[in-house]
Amino acid sequence: MGARAEALEPRQARGPGCAAALPPCGRGRSGPPSHPPPTRSWPVTLPARSFPSRFPRRNMAGNREEAPDYGRGVVIMDDWPGYDLSLFTYPQHYYGDLEYVLIPHGIIVDRIERLAKDIMKDIGYCDIMVLCVLKGGYKFCADLVEHLKNISRNSDRFVSMKVDFIRLKSYRNVLIVEDVVGTGRTMKALLSSIEKYKPNMIKVASLLVKRTPRSDGFRPDYAGFEIPNLFVVGYALDYNEYFRDLNHICVINEHGKEKYRV
């Protein structure tokens, strides 16, 4: 590449009781920008200490994990500062409503591609019924299914893949696709209702798993990212139907919560 790639640096980590120090970007953390965020050229180079080159073995604070854990995914630590909004493009009507970017869109897409490979390797080349949990799960489900289909197209075996939205009366091999697992109680109730149809196999894939003190211990079979107990929006995750058109997963600020409160 002729041009030198720009390094994408995380925001400075927040200390106890202190606000994060942001690099100069023409805007504060909560107020409206003085000018639109600059458009950055791609590709960008992610520093090794920020995003791991081998997702299952490192978390997003740079610490190593002992072994891959599909049910945990990429672990984002509580002190992960995220990225300043000025480093990315996002819809102008959300200026002033977001705190920072937690997971950039490109990382989400790459992680979902890896999940598809893990799922296909784990369950084998058998017919799959994909059940999407609406509404927040539709974007994750669509991208995951597309990657699964690409793997099937490039293999020597055809894999039949059907998608439905929790309406079937009979099941065989089931993959449930969810956007966020929090307490786990909703997913446990859904699994209980599906198990009465005696499917051959049930697997759960969730884009996000929140670390919350209210969790009952449920873990999905496949997780994209394990995140702190934050209020996140974007990538079809909404707040009162807003932010579904935001590609990145971001943390909403208090101004955004109040603005879109019903």
Image: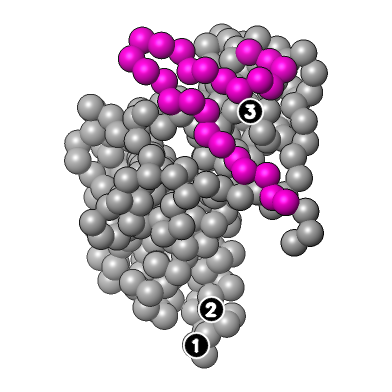
3 or 2: tag closer to the N-terminus: 3
Task: Tell me if 27 is positioned left or right of 180 in this view.
Answer: right
Q: Position of residue 240 (x, y in %)?
A: 56, 23
Q: Indicate which label's residue lies in the foreground, 3 or 2.
A: 3
| Residue at screen point 62% across, 18% down | 97
Q: Residues within 10 Å of mark 2 (few under 14, many from 20)?
A: some
Disc 2 element: helix
Numbered tag placed on residue 85 in the rendering: 3
Disc 3 element: helix
**CB-based contact (under 8 Å), mark 1 and mark 2:** yes
Q: Indicate which label's residue lies in the foreground, 3 or 1.
A: 3
**CB-based contact (under 8 Å), mark 3 and mark 2:** no
Name the residue carrying label 1.
Answer: 157
**CB-based contact (under 8 Å), mark 3 and mark 1:** no
Q: Position of residue 107 (x, y in %)?
A: 54, 49
Q: Amino acid at mark 2?
A: Ser
| Residue at screen point 69% across, 22% down | 25
Q: Quadrant of the C terminus?
A: top right
**Residue lying furthest left in this view?**
217
Judging from the image, the colouring scheme is one colour
Pick whichever, 31 or 15, lies toward us: 15
Numbered tag placed on residue 152 in the rendering: 2
| Residue at screen point 30% across, 51% down | 64
| Residue at screen point 41% across, 59% down | 54
In this rendering, the answer to whether 166 lies above or below 60 is: below
The magenta stretch is 4-28
For residue 6: magenta? yes
Q: Position of residue 74 (x, y in %)?
A: 39, 49
Is residue 206 visible in the rendered image? The answer is: no
